[in-house]
Image (cartoon, grey):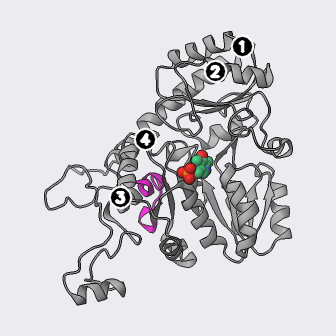
Amino acid sequence: MMKTKIKPTLESVAVHAGEGKKDQYGSHATPIYQTSTYVFDDVEAGAKAFRHEEGGASHVYSRLGNPTVEALERAVCELETYSLDNPEDYAGMAFGSGMAAITTGIIALAKGGHIVAQDALYGCTSQFLKEEVPVMGMSCSFADMSDLFQVEMELKKHPETKLIYLESIANPTMTVADIKALSQLAEEYGAKLMVDNTFATPYHIRPFELGADVVVHSTTKYIGGHGSVIGGVMVAKKEVYEESEAALFRKNLGGIAGPMDAWLTLNGVKTLPLRMKKHAENGMKVARFLEDHPKVDHVFYPGLESHPQHALASSIMKDGYGGMIAFELVGGYEAGVSLMNNVKLCTLAVSLGAVDTLIQHPASMTHSIVDEDLKKQAGITDGLVRISVGIEGAEDIIADLEQALEIQN
Ligand SMILES: *Cc1c(COP(=O)(O)O)cnc(C)c1O
């Protein structure tokens, strides 16, 4: 009988992703190669390694590469390129933080040129583009990525644009980007498209399928998944790395991940699809509960029909809409503080993508020292609350929010 090759599910790929050859002991789990340097068999092996020739030592020094880190790089790459015909053309690169992946990627890809970036981005990315990029011999302008006309105007104004930068789902209104249309614009104007896929993860959105050139992640969030490690990953075609010399930039800027952190993150990868399924199921239930609550003015969640990009989200997001929700309280600042002080199950903390539900009120917490204009620019209003819905029982999360919204002090 002919055996037809069946494509494994994303769940199966995630469980086995990144596995290489077994080590000399047949270790089942990927070992943590906690070493800074590697011993050469002889001068020849060392010399060949430095000349990148066949038959040389495979590793030289852990700022350049480490077997545990490489397992993570393969794993995230496998998920982001799932369903592509040519996954072997792509590779991953792991970093010590999401910001290291983002900044190294931007510097390598946009060096000496212009960047057109999304107007509302993760705070540190935005600060890097506004304050540091201009002193590094690059320039940056901003556009509303849901307005293709505006993006094209920026590209026309800046013919030296090398990079378009955006987030597949962006704070605070959970804006979903039309990656396909933007990648066509990028190609037309000779720029590369780089997508921060942290909120969506490859479970919901795989930007390469839609034409993106580079994907970056803060693996601190969903990919690590347990709130136990800071990390980042970049995935791109090998030719993009060669052209941009990204490996050289990582080596000299020095942002590679450590082996222990890579190992923790790799454990997260194995359950990513399983967790995202639950995050998305819970996200939908919590969003619906909030939408019906009289003390809630508005809910921003791409899964709700009221979201301005619900149709786009439905066409590009697979198997749900993720676990990130923002909502506006009728009672403004005081109501936000009261909610924060009265939740019991939900964890009062910044960050996102952990197994537990994290809740925060930007106006009184992360953005309390940010001036009014900047807050307004970032869409942070007094009653805005952000929730990263965890994988607890949905009924427990809802009951906690219900009792906390009931109290007003
Ligand atoms: C957290 C985050 C980052 C930064 O990642 P770190 O791991 O904290 O350096 C970048 N982009 C998004 C969307 C994030 O949520």
Q: Is there any visible trace of residue 197 in the rendered image?
A: no
Which residue does the numbered mark 4 point to in the structure image? 272
Q: Residue at x 61, y 11 (%)?
A: 403
Cα distance between the residues tagged 4 and 1 = 38 Å
State the CA–CA distance, disc 1 to disc 2: 9 Å
* Location of residue 158 by image quarter: bottom right
| Quarter of the view holding residue 185 | bottom right
Question: Crowdedness of circle 2 by 10 Å Cα count: few (<14), some, many (20+)?
Answer: some
Is 348 positioned to the left or the right of 136 in the image? left
What residue span does the magenta drawing correspond to? 75-90
Q: Which residue is mark 3?
A: 259
Q: Earlier in the sequence, mark 1 or mark 2?
A: 2
Which comes sooner in the sequence, label 4 or label 3?
Answer: 3
Q: Secondary structure at mark 4?
A: helix
| Percent x, y of residue 42 | 20, 86
Q: Which residue is mark 2?
A: 341
Task: Give, as a three-letter code, the residue at label 4.
Answer: Leu
Position of 187 compared to 213: left or right?
right
Residue 220's place in the image compared with 294, above or below, is below
- Vertically, is 405 above or below 54? above
User: Which residue is labeled 1 in the image?
Assistant: 409
SS for callout 1: loop
> Is label 4 in contact with label 3 (beta carbons under 8 Å)?
no
Could you tell me how far apart the alpha carbons at marks 4 and 2 are, in whole angstroms? 31 Å
Q: Is residue 381 visible?
A: yes
Instruction: Please tell me which of labels 4 and 2 falls first in the chain.
Output: 4
Where residue 289 appears, as percent x and y from the top left, is: 64, 17
**82 magenta-colored:** yes
Quadrant in which the C terminus is drawn: top right
Quarter of the rendering containing residue 275:
top left
